[in-house]
Amino acid sequence: SLGNDPRSGCPSDVTVCQLSLGSVRPGILGNIPGNSFGNCPGNTLILTRLQRDRDPISIRIPTEHSQAPLASVLREFESIQREQRETNGCTDRQEWWTRRSQLDLRMKSLIQSLESQVLGCWRGLLLPSPAGNPPLDQESLALLPELRECGWEKP
């Protein structure tokens, strides 16, 4: 049993990061027909980081004015998934590999866009942080001013 705090069941060397789709208006995400992201006005990403014996960190990342708004990234992801399902039905081996390679390149580009243009400076929260590492603790203190420039208010 994990009790009331799901972090208590995690090993001390495990970091759990969760990315969630958010919206400024409550209830708007529940109205997406067919779970499609295509009509989703939500351009907010919620990044939550959980570690045992540490307070959770949740960051709201608005993306509507970024180079890659979250809604467009999700539409591309949905398109890649749809084309993957179509590719799975392809019987010509050479055509299958050609399609698969193109989808792999699109997925690589999508991940790079998500990392650099959506997550931006917050992508560092996805990295593990070993507990009790004094050089790392010093580095994180030096990082605080940069995080504040990105909108983070409290350590």
Image (cartoon, rainbow, N blue to C red):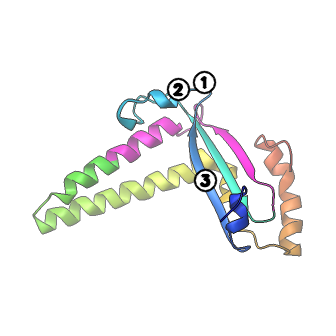
Left/right placement of residue 85 relative to residue 45 reads: left
**Which quadrant holds the N terminus?**
bottom right
Secondary structure at badge 3 equals strand
Residue in view at x 15 percent, y 57 percent: 89
Residue 51, image x, y percentages: 73, 63
25 is higher (above) or lower (below) than 127 = above
Residue 26's x, y, as percent?
60, 26
Q: Residue at x 45, y 51 (%)?
A: 110
Residue shown at 53% from the left, 36% from the top: 69
Left or right of 64 on screen, residue 81 = left
Question: Is residue 60 shown in magenta?
Answer: yes
**Callout 2–callout 1 Cβ contact below 8 Å:** yes
User: Quick one: SS at disc 2?
Assistant: loop
Confirm whether the magenta stretch covers residue 123: no
User: What segment carries the magenta color?
Assistant: 54-79
Residue 96, quarter of the rendered image: bottom left
Mark 2–mark 3 Cα distance, whole angstroms, equals: 20 Å
Amino acid marked by disc 3: Gln
* Residue 93 x, y percent position in the rendering: 13, 68
Give the residue number, with chain letter if any, for mark 1.
25
Q: CA distance from mark 1 to mark 3?
A: 21 Å
> Mark 3 Cα within 10 Å, few/some/many (few <14, many 20+)?
few
Residue drawn 22% across the image and 62% down it: 98
Could you tell me the amino acid type at mark 1? Answer: Arg
Residue 18, labelled with which disc?
3
Res 81 seen here:
yes
Q: Which residue is denoted by mark 2 in the rendering?
A: 28
